Image (cartoon, rainbow, N blue to C red):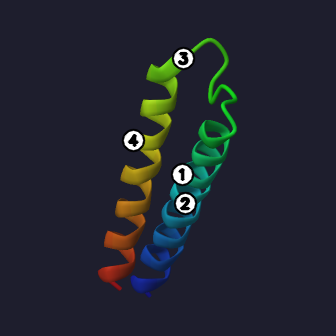
Amino acid sequence: MESTPALFAGMVFALSGAALLVWAGARTAGRAPVTQGGGPVGAALTILFGAVSLLAGVWCLAQV
């Protein structure tokens, strides 16, 4: 029973992290702002949190 919550959390983290990275990459490649009024700091933080979320998801899935 303990593997079900870990599987769910891992999938949520991995999908949201991957979505953040894809979205930030597409916005950056199109020279569009990633955040409203954030500038390059907002883009860097979005990519950082996307990568951390993706790594947390992979870690959770590896624990199952």
**Structural crowding at the residue carrying mark 3, measured as other residues with C-alpha within 10 Å and reported as few (<14), some (14–19) or many (≥20):** few
Work out whether mark 3 precedes mark 4 in sequence or the reverse, and give the earlier one.
3
Q: Residue at x 46, y 70 (%)?
A: 10
- CA–CA distance in space, label 2 to label 1: 5 Å
Give the quarter of the image for residue 32. top right
Q: Quadrant of the C terminus?
A: bottom left
Q: Which mark is residue 37?
A: none
Q: What kind of element bears circle 3?
A: helix
Residue at left offset 49%, top offset 82%: 4
Which residue is label 3 attached to?
A: 39
Provide the secondary structure element on which disc 1 rests. Answer: helix
Residue tagged 1: 21
Tell me how far mark 2 sits from mark 3, CA to CA: 21 Å
* Quadrant of the image containing the N terminus: bottom left
In the rendered structure, which disc, 4 or 1, sits on the residue that comes first in sequence?
1
1 or 3: tag closer to the N-terminus: 1
SS at badge 4: helix
Mark 4 surroundings within 10 Å by alpha-carbon count, few (fewer than 14), some (14 through 19), many (20 or more): some
Question: Which residue carries the number 4 mark?
Answer: 48
Cα–Cα gap, marks 3 and 4: 15 Å
Q: Which mark is residue 18?
A: 2
Q: CA distance from mark 4 to mark 1?
A: 9 Å
Distance in Å between CA atoms under marks 2 and 4: 11 Å
Residue 27: x %, y % from top left: 66, 39
Amino acid at pointer 1: Leu
What kind of element bears circle 2?
Answer: helix
Q: Are marks 2 and 1 in contact (CB under 8 Å)?
A: yes
Q: Amino acid at mark 3?
A: Gly
